[in-house]
Image (cartoon, rainbow, N blue to C red):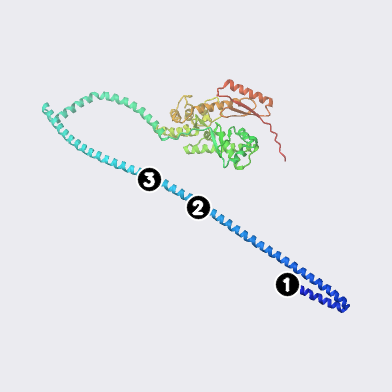
Amino acid sequence: METVFIIIAAVVGIAIGFVVGKMLSKANVDTQIAAAKNLEEKAKNDAANLISEAKRKAENTSREAQSKADSVRNEAENAKKDKMYEAKEHFLKLKEEHTKETVERERVLLENESKLKGKEQSLNAKIENYTKKESEIEVLKEQLNSQIVIATKKKEDLDKAHEQHIQKLEQVAQISAEDAKAQLVELLKEKAKTEAMVHVKTTMEEAQMRASKEAKKIIIQSIQRTAAEVSIENTVSVFNLTSDDQKGQIIGREGRNIRALEAATGVEIIVDDTPEAIIISGYDAYRREIARLSLQRLVADGRIHPARIEEVVAKTEKQLEAQIMEIGERTVIDLGIHGLHPELIRIVGKMRFRSSYGQNLLQHSREVAHLCAIMASELGINVKMAKRAGLLHDIGKVSDEDPELSHALLGAKLCEKYGEHPSIINAVGAHHDEMEMTYVISPIIQACDAISGARPGARREILESYLKRINELEALAVSYQGVNKAYAIQAGRELRVIVESEKITHKETEELSFKIAQQIQDEMTYPGQVKVTVIRELRAVSVAK
């Protein structure tokens, strides 16, 4: 580095000398010499300064390089130490995991070994028991063989003694065995002649008893051939959801959607902690089915609000009416019944959503029809006519006409209205002894109805009385003027009455609620209390064209 600076200084000096020579040629020699000396002195000083500055920079550069090298060396050593520490920690971690796995494997092996030892001990115990039982069986077999030998010997001795006894009797009676048999036969013939008349009388009495037994036999066979599973109708239905997130959408803001659905269908919608399920509660299976199908449509569509709910419920009711007609047609086809009036077919389909003492009415009617067919076949009566009467015997429970009549008389009236045979009309009206039985199939219908309802578990008296009380509650509310609909919910503890806004004012709703509550309190018997809620809604609808 110093050589470089010396060379630079020499070059600078040469240049200065060249300049000085030029100047000497143009000026005075003295002046030029002096100037040259000054310049030379200045050049020497500049060169010395440059050399010292270069040395200082070189020293600084060397010191910086040394410090950088030291820092790099320190960083490398630190990185090496860190890597070694990490490697050591990783090794210790792997060693610990390996130790745990080894301990776990040893524990599992010990458990399996103990289980195998236990199984081996139990197997050894079972083998010992089997061996012991086999030895006992061998002992019993030997004893049995010895007893058989003894019994055989005793039988031979008994036969010999019997022959000796017969020979002694012949010697005493002085008559052979064949003669004794002939005399005994003659005596039996005389005795038979004297008892013949008694036998005839006994035979007649037995014939009467046999007729009663045959009747019972026919009934028992009919019951056995039509034995079906007992199915009790419930008062709740479960609507399954794909996720619990849909519950909030169904409830709606401040419960508006649920209230609209309950008002439109007359059932109670219960949204609880049950995962992915909503409970539809109501005593009327028809209303529950409307609510279930409506919910199914609303959830599938995704648009759930009060106006949409009313629209879907109305469409569902029409759809269910078509479904009821289809159920009735399928029922009459399955039973092989032809020529039934369409209105009667619709009523038969409606039985699917009606229960009697907890027993599904359509199932009960089908069962009665099969029983009647079997009994009619055994008795030689028209099977098709009996089956037809059995299916139609309870249609009065479904119709809304003349509610003051009993279901038997109402059913007979409907059969007469739609052109059924007089024997069927009589069988339907007389199956509860409310009409005189004038045809052979009438008592068959009565018997089969009793058989279907009398099977253990087929009916529930408590449920029927509950349904009757619910119907009475709703009928009481509907009897008031201006009432559009009435629904009993909360197991009969709440009565919701929907009135027509054009006929009843706000003030009159309060009076109506009080009147209904007072009438329920005075005329009905019920547990706890009944809450009466009167709902009046005013709607103004306009269409923009």
Viewed as shown, does residue 307 lie left or right of 183? right
Q: Secondary structure at mark 1?
A: helix
Inspect the image, locate mark 3, and give the three-letter code of the amino acid beneath it.
Answer: Lys
The quarter holding residue 224 reads top left
Work out whether 385 lies above or below 71.
above
Q: Secondary structure at mark 3?
A: helix
Inspect the image, locate mark 2, and give the three-letter code of the amino acid beneath it.
Answer: Lys
Q: Which residue is mark 1?
A: 4
Q: Which residue is mark 3?
A: 117
The quarter holding residue 519 reads top right
Work out whether 92 lies above or below 237.
below
**Mark toward the start of the polypeptide (3 vs 1):** 1
Residue with the most extreme top position:
522
Viewed as shown, does residue 229 lie left or right of 486? left
Q: Which residue is mark 2?
A: 95
The total of numbered circles placed on residues is: 3
- Gap in Å between the C-alphas at discs 2 and 3? 32 Å
Neighbours of disc 1 within 10 Å: few (<14), some (14-19), many (20+): few
